[in-house]
């Protein structure tokens, strides 16, 4: 019955944790729209164009996925896309409180939209974009956490590209 789901986030940058959630969502829904937030209040390392482009490249082999940037209210975007489901990833109990508040607020704003939480594979439960940025900025390797293209882009951002 429910065919389209929206997976929103800042994806600054996309990690294997995000991709794990996206893959699980495509096993349930016919189409998944990855909605990249161009929220001005949140300072990001990558621009909205860069984040969308990177996601498009790394999801190229996943035909059910579409990547779109959006501004404004998430529930309005979800309704515009003819979707009724928001996908969010839950890593640990620490994610829960914030995610519960967000899900209930979104429901309050639009009762027709529900949030579905998916848990990543165990190795990704401690993975976040911020941790990856921290590691790469200090010269560490991120091959286990992000696709090669993303690691390369991170190195370029931190001017750590190999000579
Ligand atoms: P936001 O700023 O909206 O939290 P993120 O890009 O950090 O954007 O996260 C988007 C969604 O992906 C959130 O639901 C977050 O919990 C989930 N997520 C991020 N990293 C992981 C991970 N390693 N495993 C599972 N879910 C994750």
Image: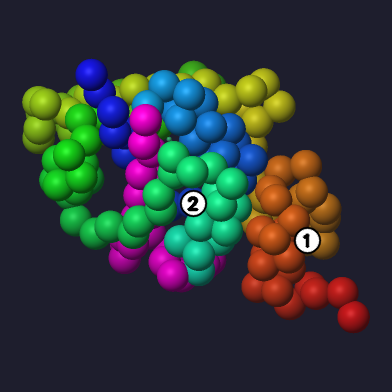
Q: Is residue 8 visible?
A: no
Mark 1 surroundings within 10 Å by alpha-carbon count, few (fewer than 14), some (14 through 19), many (20 or more): few
Q: Earlier in the sequence, mark 2 or mark 1?
A: 2
Front residue of this view, candidates 53 and 121: 53
Q: Helix, strand, or loop for circle 1?
A: loop
In x, y percent, where is residue 92?
Answer: 53, 22
Against 50, residue 89 (above or below) is: above
Front residue of this view, candidates 73 and 25: 25
Mark 2 surroundings within 10 Å by alpha-carbon count, few (fewer than 14), some (14 through 19), many (20 or more): many
Q: Is residue 138 left or right of residue 2?
A: right
Q: Is residue 11 left or right of residue 160?
A: left
| Magenta residues (range) | 30-49
Front residue of this view, candidates 11 and 32: 32
Q: Where does the N terminus fall, quadrant-wise? A: top left
* Rendered image quadrant of residue 83: top left
| Cα distance between the residues tagged 2 and 1 | 20 Å
Number of the label disc, if any, that sits on residue 11: 2
In x, y percent, where is residue 42?
Answer: 38, 59
In x, y percent, where is residue 26?
Answer: 46, 30
Residue 159 lies within the magenta run:
no
In x, y percent, where is residue 58?
Answer: 60, 52
Task: Specify the color scheme.
Answer: rainbow
Q: Is residue 8 left or right of residue 108?
A: right
Q: How many marks?
A: 2
Against 64, residue 88 (above or below) is: above
Eye-nearest disc, 2 or 1 = 2
Against 93, residue 128 (above or below) is: below
Task: List the single residue furthest toward the right.
Answer: 163
* Residue at 90% across, 80% down: 163
State whether label 2 is within 8 Å of ligand 1.
yes
Name the residue tied to disc 1: 138
* Residue at 36% across, 44% down: 33
């Amino acid at each position: 019955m429910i065919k389209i789901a929206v997976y929103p986030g800042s994806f600054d940058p996309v990690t294997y944790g995000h991709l794990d959630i996206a893959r699980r969502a495509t096993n349930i829904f016919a189409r998944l729209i990855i909605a990249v937030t161009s929220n001005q209040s949140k300072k990001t390392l990558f621009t909205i164009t860069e984040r969308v482009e990177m996601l498009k490249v790394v999801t190229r082999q996943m035909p059910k996925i579409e990547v779109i940037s959006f501004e404004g209210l998430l529930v309005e975007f979800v309704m515009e896309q003819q979707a009724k489901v928001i996908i969010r990833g839950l890593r640990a109990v620490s994610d829960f409180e914030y995610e519960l508040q967000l899900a209930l607020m979104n429901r309050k704003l639009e009762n027709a939209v529900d949030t579905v939480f998916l848990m990543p594979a165990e190795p990704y439960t401690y993975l976040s974009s911020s941790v990856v940025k921290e590691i790469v900025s200090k010269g560490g390797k991120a091959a286990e956490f992000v696709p090669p293209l993303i690691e390369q882009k991170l190195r370029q951002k931190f001017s750590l590209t190999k000579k």
